[in-house]
Image (cartoon, helix red, strand yellow):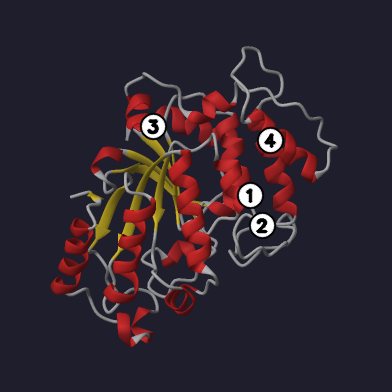
């Protein structure tokens, strides 16, 4: 992970700090389409000193527009989330907890992990269901969270949940007040809209993704999302071009053939240099016991089959 390591070694500026140095030209009364046109133009500009209005400011303006007709994810509720919640059950950003996490991949720890409540998925097996399926926690003013980030001394900032996608306007506001040269991690189910992926461009240094399923049927039945493959494959391809990437895949009982093998094959063809974490810690949680196919722990033979297939595909597997 060349860029991530360069930031940690002080050899490179993290993306969001660079974004603050890129000028953008808008006054706030432009149409939504005009803002996007300026956004795409600004992405091609060089950094400057003494920038009055930055690309980050423009991203915040666009995010606030989307918030009022929400389409941060591909549910595309189009609700005004200042007045009501969408499918994600998220209104104002609510942080369930934040701390230095030592249970992440070795190159990430200690990771300053910020858990939002609420999620745009309804996974019946969710291990964080107490925060993903409920709105619990507190609102922290962006200035305060920025100060906490600067004092934590983590190797990175790990935006997760729940799901970070509905909380993108808040995340951008936090980064506006933050000045630490620290990598930003997008820890997500990747059911983002194209618009969200564009806003993340130039902000995120490492995508820590969750590639759950190998087909639409399993995704709809177990997580309640439509067109999973089209959306998640598209976003992984976009993310792979934008930043460093670690792809997580949780192997589930009875889902090796239908999900694990297709996912690993897709990665080998479309993101061959991404690191891959083939995970074996599945356990039936939340409402998993209502589904016979996943109401038990993972069998050793099932995991070995997925892992060996990953090796056969010559993936960069984390151990």
> Any mark on residue 195, and which?
1
In this view, the mark in front (2 or 3): 2
Q: Is residue 246 left or right of residue 123?
A: left
Q: Nearer the viewer, mark 4 or mark 3?
A: 4
Q: Secondary structure at mark 1?
A: helix
Q: Which residue corresponds to mark 3? A: 152
Q: CA distance from mark 3 to mark 1?
A: 31 Å
Query: Whole-Å distance between the Cαs marked 2 and 1?
Result: 8 Å
Q: Earlier in the sequence, mark 2 or mark 4?
A: 4
Gap between marks 4 and 1, in whole Å?
Answer: 11 Å
Q: Are the two marked residues, 2 and 1, in contact with CB atoms closer than 8 angstroms? A: yes
Looking at the image, is mark 3 or mark 1 earlier in the sequence? 3
Q: Residues within 10 Å of mark 1 (few under 14, many from 20)?
A: some
The residue carrying pointer 4 sits among few (fewer than 14), some (14 to 19) or many (20 or more) residues within 10 Å by Cα, namely many
Q: What is the C-alpha distance between the residues marked 2 and 3?
A: 32 Å
In the picture, measured across the screen, residue 130 lies left or right of residue 250, that is right
Question: Relative to 66, is 17 above or below?
Answer: above
**Which is nearer the eye, 75 or 110?**
75
Whether label 4 touches label 3, CB < 8 Å: no
Mark 2 or mark 3, earlier in chain: 2
Q: Residue at x 63, y 23 (%)?
A: 45
User: Percent x, y for residue 309?
Assistant: 21, 63
Q: Is residue 98 visible?
A: yes
**Label 4: which residue?**
39
Q: Earlier in the sequence, mark 2 or mark 1?
A: 2
User: Which image quarter: residue 269?
Assistant: bottom left
Identify the residue position indicated by label 2 in the image.
Answer: 71
Query: Which circle's residue, 4 or 1, is located before the other in the chain?
Result: 4
């Amino acid at each position: 992970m060349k860029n991530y390591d360069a930031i940690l070694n002080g050899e490179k500026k993290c993306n969001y700090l660079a974004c603050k140095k890129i000028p953008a030209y808008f006054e706030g009364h432009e149409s939504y389409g005009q803002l996007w046109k300026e956004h795409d133009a600004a992405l091609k500009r060089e950094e400057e000193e003494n920038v009055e209005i930055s690309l980050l400011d423009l991203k915040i303006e666009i995010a606030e527009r989307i918030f009022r007709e929400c389409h941060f994810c591909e549910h595309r509720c189009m609700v005004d989330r200042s007045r009501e919640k969408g499918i994600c059950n998220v209104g104002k950003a609510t942080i369930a907890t934040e701390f230095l996490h030592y249970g992440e991949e070795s190159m990430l720890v200690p990771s300053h992990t910020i858990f939002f409540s609420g999620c745009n998925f309804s996974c019946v097996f969710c291990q964080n269901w107490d925060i993903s399926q409920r709105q619990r926690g507190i609102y922290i003013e962006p200035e305060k969270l920025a100060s906490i980030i600067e004092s934590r001394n983590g190797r990175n900032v790990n935006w997760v949940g729940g799901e970070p996608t509905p909380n993108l306007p808040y995340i951008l506001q936090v980064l506006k007040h933050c000045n630490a040269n620290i990598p930003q991690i997008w820890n997500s189910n990747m059911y983002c809209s194209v618009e969200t992926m564009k806003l993340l461009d130039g902000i995120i240094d490492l995508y820590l993704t969750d590639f759950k399923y190998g087909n639409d049927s399993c995704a709809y039945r177990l997580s309640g999302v439509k067109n999973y493959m089209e959306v998640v494959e598209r976003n992984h391809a976009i993310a792979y071009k934008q930043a460093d990437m670690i792809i997580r895949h949780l192997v589930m009982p009875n889902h090796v053939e239908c999900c694990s093998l297709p996912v690993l094959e897709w990665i080998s063809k479309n993101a061959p240099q991404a690191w891959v974490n083939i995970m074996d810690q599945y356990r039936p949680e939340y409402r998993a016991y209502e589904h016979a196919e996943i109401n038990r722990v993972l069998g050793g033979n099932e995991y070995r089959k997925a892992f060996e297939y990953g090796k056969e595909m010559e993936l960069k597997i984390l151990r």
